[in-house]
Amino acid sequence: MNRHVNAIAGRLSLRAPQRDSLVILDRLTEILPPKKGADLAAALEIIRSEYPTVTDFEREFPSLCFALATGVGKTRLMGAFIAYLHLAHGIDNFFVL
């Protein structure tokens, strides 16, 4: 497992569902490194090979949704995702909606 996942999960005291989501993000970026201009059809097939429930990105770029229960800490998870993408992949710009 990525050292950044362990460090971020520990620093932010992520609960099990949050940590699991961060592990999934780590795995996804391992099999499909984030980059501009990715072939969406090929990216979707790569992701489906490990996560068959993913059916479509619904956008012109890879987009993912993590379904978590109310009160589990989705805001904290978003912070963990941002920290992970910055530390592990050098991504510096984020738009959170």
Image (cartoon, rainbow, N blue to C red):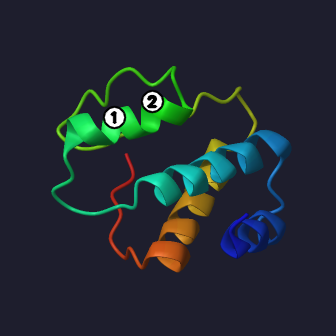
User: Pointer 1: residues within 10 angstroms few (<14), some, or many (20+)?
Assistant: some
Residue ID for mark 1: 44
Element carrying mark 2: helix
Element carrying mark 1: helix
- Position of the N terminus by quadrant: bottom right
Frontmost residue, 55 versus 95: 55
Residue 39, image x, y percentages: 19, 46
Q: Amino acid at mark 2?
A: Arg
Q: Amino acid at mark 1?
A: Leu
Residue 36, image x, y percentages: 20, 61
Can the viewer see residue 86 in this picture? Answer: yes
Frontmost residue, 88 versus 30: 30
Callouts 2 and 1 close, C-beta under 8 Å:
yes
Residue 71, image x, y percentages: 74, 34
Residue 68's place in the image compared with 29, above or below, is above
Tell me which residue sits at (35%, 33%) in the image: 45
Quadrant position of residue 64? top left
Residue ID for mark 2: 48
User: Pointer 2: residues within 10 angstroms few (<14), some, or many (20+)?
Assistant: some
Residue 47, image x, y percentages: 44, 37
Can the viewer see residue 65 in this picture? Answer: no
Tell me which residue sits at (26%, 27%) in the image: 58
In the image: residue 96, left or right of residue 78:
left
Tell me which residue sits at (17%, 39%) in the image: 60
Tell me which residue sits at (33%, 57%) in the image: 95
